Amino acid sequence: MNTRGMRRVIAAAGLAVAGVGLVACGNQTPTGGTPSTGVSTPAPSTPTAPETSTATPSNPPTSAPTTEPTKAPTTVPTKTVQPTPTKPPGVQRLANSMLLTGKEVAKADPKRGWIATSAASRSICGKAATQGNGVQGRLTRSFTTELDASGGQWLTRYQSPAAAKAAYEQIVATIKSCKAFVPGETHARKLTENRTLAVGDATAILRWYDYPKPNDPGSEDGGFPYAVTRKGTVVSVLAFGEMGKGVAPAHWEALARAAASKLP
């Protein structure tokens, strides 16, 4: 073999040895390591811890807010205002001072000798001519001349002015009809006075006159005047009687006014 050929063999052999060396170096396993794959694997990144907020939280109040205790509502009992009842008119008590006296009768009908007496008097038109229904109180007083004339006064009290008015009207109607005492066959009767006076709440004057019929010319006549007055809850009745014409009309009116003036 010539020199040129030897050189080619030596060169080829050198190349072969160099390739084996490269392979050997590439397959070398490090002690205790993982075989290299020939690919460079980056080292795993260390996870970054989340940033902690450095913001300082606001400090809570040093003391808890003062909470005022809720007061239970004071329950005040509601006062029920009761309506004030309407008071009825005051009860008017009867008193003897409301009755005429003997002297007052004698003054109204002078020179007759009138006095008060304990003897009971009567009304020719009956009890219904001296009082009405629903009487709450009653007073009477009688008068006489101790001769042939007599009379009386009746005071009656009622529950209300309306009741007194009803009694007044009933009494006047009873006197006008006067059926309680009928004159005998020898006498006749007629109403000779029937009028009113503006005294008290109401006042009526009536007079019955009994006279003999022609068949008994010797019989006596008789006069029976009435005066009825209403004031408030009280009714006053004057009823007199005597032989003849009775108390003169002017004197009787004076007596009626005197009786009315004494009522409350």
Image (tube, rainbow, N blue to C red):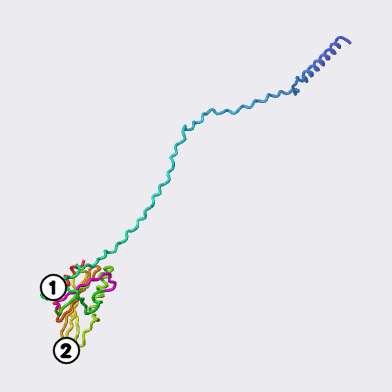
Q: Which residue is mark 1?
A: 106
- 77 versus 162 height, above or below: above
Magenta stretch containing residue 210, yes or no? no
Can residue 54 be seen here? The reply is: yes
Tell me which amino acid carries mark 2: Asp
Residue furthest bottom in the image: 215
Q: Position of residue 159 (x, y in %)?
A: 28, 68
Q: Is residue 172 left or right of residue 54?
A: left
Q: Is residue 76 left or right of residue 125?
A: right
Q: Position of residue 38 (x, y in %)?
A: 74, 22
Residue furthest front in the image: 118
Residue furthest top in the image: 3
Q: Is residue 151 left or right of residue 1?
A: left
Can residue 228 be seen here? The reply is: no
The segment highlighted magenta reads 132-146
Quadrant in the picture for the N terminus? top right
Write the residue at 15% across / 75% down: 252
Of the residues under marks 2 and 1, which one precedes in the sequence? 1
Write the residue at 39% across / 51% down: 77
Write the residue at 73% across / 23% down: 39
Which of pointers 2 and 1 indicates the residue nearer the eye?
Answer: 1
Q: CA distance from mark 2 to mark 1?
A: 34 Å
Labelled disc at residue 216: 2
Tell me which amino acid carries mark 1: Ala
Determine the secondary structure under disc 2: loop
Quadrant in the picture for the C terminus? bottom left
Q: Position of residue 172 (x, y in %)?
A: 23, 76
Q: Is residue 47 left or right of residue 100?
A: right
- 49 versus 15 height, above or below: below
Residue 112 position by quadrant: bottom left
